[in-house]
Amino acid sequence: MSRANRAVIFGGPSDEHDISILTGLQVARAVDDIQAVYWSKSGDWYLVDPGLEASDFLDGAPRKARLLAFVATPGEGLVQKRKPLPIDVAFIACHGGPGEDGTLQGALDLAGIRYTGPSQTTSAVGMDKFGFGATMEAAGLPTLDRALIPPREDSPGPDFDGPYIVKPRFGGSSIGIEVAGDWPTVLSLKKASRFFDRGAVVEPYLEKSRDLQVAVRTYPEFQLSAVEEPARSAEGIYSYDQKYLAWGGEVSSGRELPARLDDALAVEISRLSRRVADVAGLRGITRIDYLERDGEIFVNEVNTIPGSMAAYLWVDPPLDRKELFEDMLAEAESTPTRVFSTAGSDGTALANAGTIASKLG
């Protein structure tokens, strides 16, 4: 059986565009026989050399990049000079924005192209901090209170007291997250920050807590990585700048890996992670973020396409990038493409509809 035609897609019109390039280039170097597709900030698509460096993308599309078009029709997908680029499976290495929120996944579904990571629906829920929290709560998983911040400046506060963590409703990688001591400060932040334009959520700031993060993968079997405890900033959060920018785009080394856990907490993280994966429908490699205080643990967020695919967490069991990425592609190759049904659309409703004018009266 011949190997499927494979491509890694990276970049995209997202705040995490640059980090996506770094992840995509790692994938392109680590696996064999893969095409590299760059999605620009302006939304254009290019076929590029998989051996390029990060600096080649400083000004956008690199030299000798070949322009592509995306056609969301079965048998089409990425097209070069009216000829479809042969792609059976796409490795999605796009963080944030339309590459992680289900938009790209839905387009690939329409084109009949398999892809790594979760489905369109799971991607959308994972990117929605309010929706994900509500889903976990409905499933009986331990979560902190979380409320939407209304747009009105005279809005009353939530049912829980401050201090608060303020987060963009849609987004990832700690971008735009702030700590606020009281409700008026929350409303001021909501008004001032561009990251909250599409909505914001607020939750209690859990003092004297710690962040714990673990990666899960679903192929060839369900596995957990080592658990890490990332270092927090002086503001008491694990910020985007601290996470990526201070370390050249790689996840920061300011962490404890593996984290110090007693046996009961380790068992609980394992139990919860499998449950989160089942409830959310996770696939590929995902990072689940927890908050822990005095032995009590809360499901916080899920990152369906983590930076570097959370490869740095796989120290126990020790798995290298090539194995992790190849397994993600193998999982995608073995997953059927999404099938859209037209059952019931047999023309009966149209035949019996009468005139449109009669329906407007």
Image: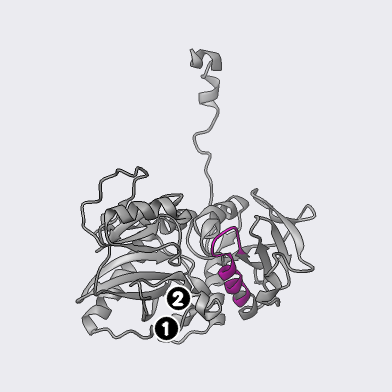
Asked if residue 194 is positioned above or below residue 243 in the image, the reply reads: above
Corner quadrant of residue 333: bottom right
Residue situated in front as seen by the camera: 300 or 160:
160
Amino acid on which the number 1 mark rests in the picture:
Gly
Is residue 25 one of those drawn in magenta?
Answer: yes
| Residue range (magenta) | 11-26
Q: For mark 2, give the secondary structure.
A: helix
Is residue 314 one of those drawn in magenta?
Answer: no
Say whether residue 220 is visible.
Answer: no
Magenta stretch mostly in which secondary structure? helix
Q: Which residue is mark 1?
A: 254
Q: Residues within 10 Å of mark 2 (few under 14, many from 20)?
A: some
Q: Mark 1 or mark 2, which has the lower sequence index? A: 2
Amino acid on which the number 2 mark rests in the picture:
Gln
**Image-based side of 29 in relation to 332, left or right:** right
**Residue contact at pointers 1 and 2, CB within 8 angstroms:** yes
Q: How many marks?
A: 2
Q: Which residue is mark 2?
A: 242
Residue displayed at 33% across by 76% down: 212
Residue displayed at 24% across by 78% down: 265
Residue displayed at 35% across by 71% down: 235
Percent position (x, y) of residue 15? 54, 61
Corner quadrant of residue 237: bottom left
Asked if residue 23 is positioned above or below residue 263 in the image, the reply reads: above
Say whether residue 127 is visible.
Answer: yes
